[in-house]
Image (spheres, rainbow, N blue to C red):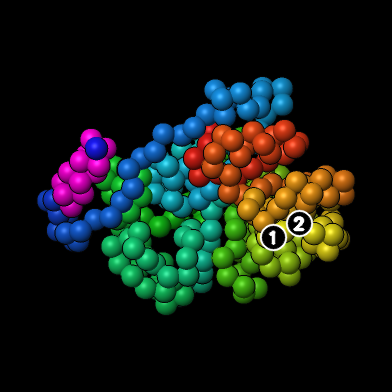
Amino acid sequence: MMAFINKIITLILVPIYFSVLSPTYPIIVLFNQPQQLISLSENGVGSAQDPVYLTAHRGVHALAPENSLPSFEEAVNNGYYSAECDIQLTKDNKWVVIHNAEVDGRFCQYGKIKDLTLDELKTFSYMWGANVWKYKDSRIPTLEEYLDVFVGTSTRPQIEIGIPDFEYLDDIVEEIEERELVNQAIVLTYNLKQLKAIHELNPDIELWYLVDEMTPEIIAEAKALGDNVWLSASYDKNTEENIRLAKSENINFSLFTVNTVEEAKALYDMGVRYIETDTLCN
């Protein structure tokens, strides 16, 4: 009951807080409370000798708005193996980090990314997400800003291409190369042809093929691209049989999105060491 009352109080007070600090904020501000990350090691999953390698899904958005620079900085600070982001292309052909093709209720303004310039998007403020009041000055990151977070760190940037187009893929590769992140960055997409295009631009960049179910056909497609191609597969769509198949075919894979200790423990016992999560930490 107290948690419910606290939530109601916060829903009333935070909009007033924002409206006082900035008259451009709407009176109604939607947001998530910060969440407590769940430690796998404290729950007996994994060890220093045989760890679980965690990818922070859209950054650590239990602690900061998803796909924001603070969410990726939290991934680095908390020692995640990698931090996944989504990128879209603006009207003036700049890659920006945001999941949907349209700016939605997570922000103070609306519109399609492809119809907005980078300068226009940089005026949009987060209005939904963990600790949104703390990061009220944060803006939608560019790909360059996202990659800069990982320079000199052990956390790997993981870039999901959010559009089916083939133009400006070379810009992604160039930004990775410029920061000397070729051996650290991961590029992933549901589009196999995009993976082939990235591979042709730089065969040393690790690629992850986003898929639903791991099948013999999917595994063969991934392996045909080269040794540094993984599968990033849906946790919900794959059974223990699919996992055994992938392991028998010697294809590296990660499963998304795994959010409970029980799920992580079951996968660990099956030999799965790479998972993507919203809520777990080591």
Report the quarter where the C terminus lies.
top right
Q: Position of residue 194 (x, y in %)?
A: 70, 67
Residue on which disc 2 sits: 214
Magenta span: 2-15
Quarter of the rendering containing residue 36: top left
Q: Position of residue 239 (x, y in %)?
A: 72, 50
Identity of the residue drawn at 64% across and 50% down: 235
Residue on which disc 1 sits: 211
Could you say whether the residue bearing mark 2 is in a helix, strand or loop?
loop
Q: Position of residue 112 (x, y in %)?
A: 42, 74
Report the quarter where the N terminus lies.
top left
Could you say whether the residue bearing mark 1 is in a helix, strand or loop?
strand
Q: Position of residue 63 (x, y in %)?
A: 40, 40
Identity of the residue drawn at 66% across and 64% down: 190
Does 224 sit above or below residue 61? below
Amino acid type, callout 2: Met
Identity of the residue drawn at 66% across and 27% down: 46
Does 277 sit above or below residue 43? below
